[in-house]
Image (spheres, rainbow, N blue to C red):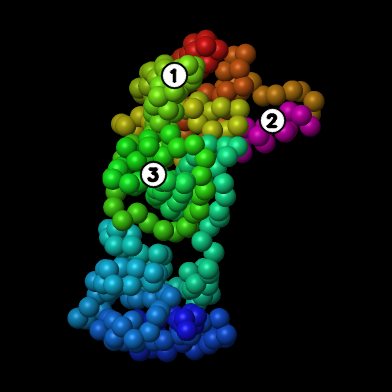
Amino acid sequence: MADDVKRVLVVDDEDDLTWSISKHLAKDRDRYDLICVNSGKKALEVLSQLPVKLVISDIRMPEISGLELLSRIRDSYPATKVIIMTAYGSSEVHEEANARGCFKYIEKPFEITDLRQLILEAIEEKRGFMGTISDFQLSDLIQMNCLGRMTTALFIVGDDYRGTIYIEDGNIVHADCGDKEGEDAVFEMLAWEGGNFSTERGKRAPKETIIKGWQSLLLEGMRRVDEAKPGRTDIGGQLAKTQREISRILDKLASLKGVILTTVFDPEGFPVASQINPDSPRKYAIQELTPIISALIKQVDSIGQDLKIKKPKSISAEFEEAILKVNKVQDRKEYLVILAENKINIGVLTLEAKKNLRKLSRILEK
């Protein structure tokens, strides 16, 4: 008979902490069994005897550290999730923990309610969602997860094929299908017609084989699919050409002194193309800005409707440390977005934006 008991194992060499955790989490005894031990060695002994749903381990312990315990669990008990507790919240520690397959980490001192929430989230049986690829494309699923900055595994299954795409923090980091992996696997799956899919939230890739941005991957995949089908209009090729022309314009704008980034958003609020100034001290990912800019445009549009003054042509916001300009492309529904340092010459920026809005309009009409 299968063991359906959910067990949570807490590992910390501080007796006071394990006692406090066990006392405060006693009210959840109807949801899971809580086991507390004071060393990595004892934790491995428990794991060898009982199936454990979740391990919560301190990172600094004698004999076996939390990171070493994490690696052993990943190798021997891959279904067991691990939460790392640490008072040393450096980015290096977080990156190392993530690389070894850590589910979550929590920094000491922490509120017991925060730890409780992490535990309940980790032992949930929800694996994400399932569905059928029919009326929409696999690229839609990928775009949805990337724009949502999800960390998930996307499983694709057909009659005679299966593959997996791993997305971490909104970036495609690995893919595999058959004997292919990396970008080739993504391109292969994008060419599949129909199938079923499921996702597993929080599941991380076993390795990283993809560094190219997801937008570029999808565009290249669409181009390849269209080229492989004789008699079809070269939609992917035209899209790729359009994006290249837009990128050249954005690259020129991004090269202006003081510009942080430039991007073009489509009417649905998705980025068509973007360029980031590599010399800017401020670092942003376009995935971070997408929901912000989209919400801003929709809010201003709503204000225009309420005041019965139609849609906005431009939005300008001057902050203490930066300037944001959003301009509607002439005779189009797309928007040109420019984020710049507040020391930039506003006159030059406005002139360059106006000049390139006309160029963007011609390119998007093709």
Residue flagged by tag 1: what amino acid is it?
Answer: Pro
Residue occupying the point 49% across, 72% down: 123
Q: Is residue 328 above or below residue 121?
A: above
Residue 249 sits inside the magenta stretch: no
Mark 3 residue element = strand
The residues bearing labels 1 and 3 have C-alpha atoms spaced at a distance of 29 Å
The residue that mark 3 highlights is 172
Q: Is residue 154 left or right of residue 174?
A: right
Horizontal and vertical percent for residue 330? 59, 14
Residue flagged by tag 3: what amino acid is it?
Answer: Ile
Tally of numbered tags: 3
Mark 2 residue element = helix
- Chain-order first, disc 2 or disc 1: 1
Please tell me whether the stretch drawn in magenta is mainly helix, strand or loop: helix
Name the mark nearer the viewer: 2 or 1.
1
- Report the magenta residues as a range: 295-306
Mark 1 residue element = loop
